[in-house]
Image: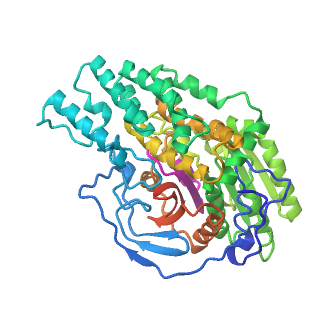
Amino acid sequence: MQASQEPQTSTGIHSLYPQPMQQIEPYCFSPLQVLNSNSNVHGSQGTEVSFQTCTEQFFTLESTPATDYVIYNSPSAVSVSSNRSPFSPQCSQSYVSDVHHSSDNTYGSPLSGYSGVDDNNKLMHALMVLRNELLGPESDIDDSCSFYSVASQTSSLTRCNQILEMAPNMDLQQVLITCAEAVSESDIATAEALMDILERRVSVSGEPIERLSAYMLEGLRARLLSSGSIIYKKLKCKEITSAELISYMQVLYHICPYYKFAYMSANVVIGEAMENENRIHIIDFQIAQGSQWVSLIQALARRPGGPPYIHITGVDDSQSAHARGGGLELVGQTLAKVAKSCGVPFEFHAAGMSGCEVQLENLQIRNGEALAVNFPYMLHHMPDESVSTMNHRDRLLRLVKSLSPKVVTLVEQESNTNTSPFFQRFCETLNYYTAMFESIDAARSREDKQRINAEEHCVARDVVNIIACEDTDRVERHELFGKWRLRLMMAGFSPIPLSQSVSTAIKDMLNEYSPNYRLAESNGALYLGWKNRAMATSSAWR
């Protein structure tokens, strides 16, 4: 998908968000072009759907069930009432009681140790024979166990040999999962042998699972060698220039909608909340290049009665500074130029620090300014109570609540990798990022060098961090929306219903992408999905 496509003028909410000026370069993405779409939304009668649910349901704090949601799968909107994730007819994907439990994953990212295709029937029969020979025909081992578990009752050497005999008949996912089990069980001999097999089967220019497996293999090696944090830091600080890094981020922005979804949904919510305010203060806890706010400034400049005074506080980290090629002053200068060109009174305040370091005095709160706070894919980096007694995740939420904001926008990945044990976390990562890699695959050829570099420098390090690191070194700690909802409510927040304008704008934006992207509403949040896997959520609070 080319960023140079110019949408035609449309009416309604989209007219408030024009294309960005050519000189404004986005950090990873720019939401401006999305909100001025040439797509019209066609109303349609919703269809009532009843999905089959599992007999046993295991919901934890991380997997609060979704109820009464609407799925937008253009052209028809489907009204759904279910206790399931908005995009899948099975039980929650946080089915932590059985890490091999697999939903109906049409995008090809099963968590099961087995493949459901006919080609594996002979292999399944061989495994059953092997089980009976080892443990007898009356064994109580569950048939859904993995390859590793089938051989787990034998000696280490024998188990390793048996798994290696089975490996040629396993698909790549099965080998990867079996290797992760061996790592989890500290079975070094089996793990290293399977890693050698994986090394010959992965490719950064292959199919999505081959590309993802290359990075997951790197994470497994790092974990086995207890060098996870070292590998992660090397990946994070690869010797690439800031211009190269920003170009890779822009590739991801153009070929998949995850960041457009974040910026656009937050902008619409904030714009509506500040409709009648004359003095506005926006605190962005991950401001990056500040591109998100260009469209909002331009929209507010056209407000009847004149533009408001806009005060933006940008919180930053060192990685964003590297991508920009400079400090937050660059963001302030860029936004000040935009505001001046629009005749908008503007002020920028830089808070160059991690969210863990932010205190009240860093935020320049003033009486008379209506406050909006933006958390774009940021809060999952804050360590919670499972990492530190400081619990910066909840501390930051309580701090923001004490400021009495008019609106808070939260966008997060819909994944459960925060407190899960290693093997469950590995399976969740495999499931989530297989969907992400497949969505990237739908937009760029597999030999595309830019796509390869974007995955390596912008995605792979996150995957390695989740798999290889623990404690304070593991900074990628995603939670499902149900858990975020509980955290926000415990901090004193109440959800704000999202207006139809938000979903309308996102649906129009998704028309530019693969039809496999889906949109749904559930529990007050907007879900972005790839096929039947929820990928991200956007919600508003006060």
Report if residue 116 is visible in the image.
Answer: no
Residue 88 locus on image (x, y percent): 40, 60
Report if residue 109 is visible in the image.
Answer: yes
Color theme of the render:
rainbow
Picture quarter with the C terminus = bottom right
The tally of labels here is 0
Q: Residue at x 66, y 64 (%)?
A: 512
Pick the residue in front: 314 or 82.
82
Position of 466 compared to 253: left or right?
left
Q: Which residues are magenta?
A: 397-416
- Using the image, determine if residue 13 lies above or below residue 421: below
Q: Residue at x 83, y 63 (%)?
A: 344
Q: Residue at x 65, y 59 (%)?
A: 371
Residue 531 locus on image (x, y percent): 49, 59
Q: Is residue 403 magenta?
A: yes
- Using the image, determine if residue 226 lies above or below residue 256: above
Picture quarter with the N terminus = bottom right
Quadrant in the picture for residue 177: top left
Pick the residue in front: 193 or 29.
193
Residue 146 locus on image (x, y percent): 31, 37
Residue 225 locus on image (x, y percent): 48, 19
Q: Residue at x 36, y 59 (%)?
A: 65
Pick the residue in front: 329 or 415.
415
- Using the image, determine if residue 103 lies above or below residue 167: below
Position of 205 compared to 121: left or right?
right
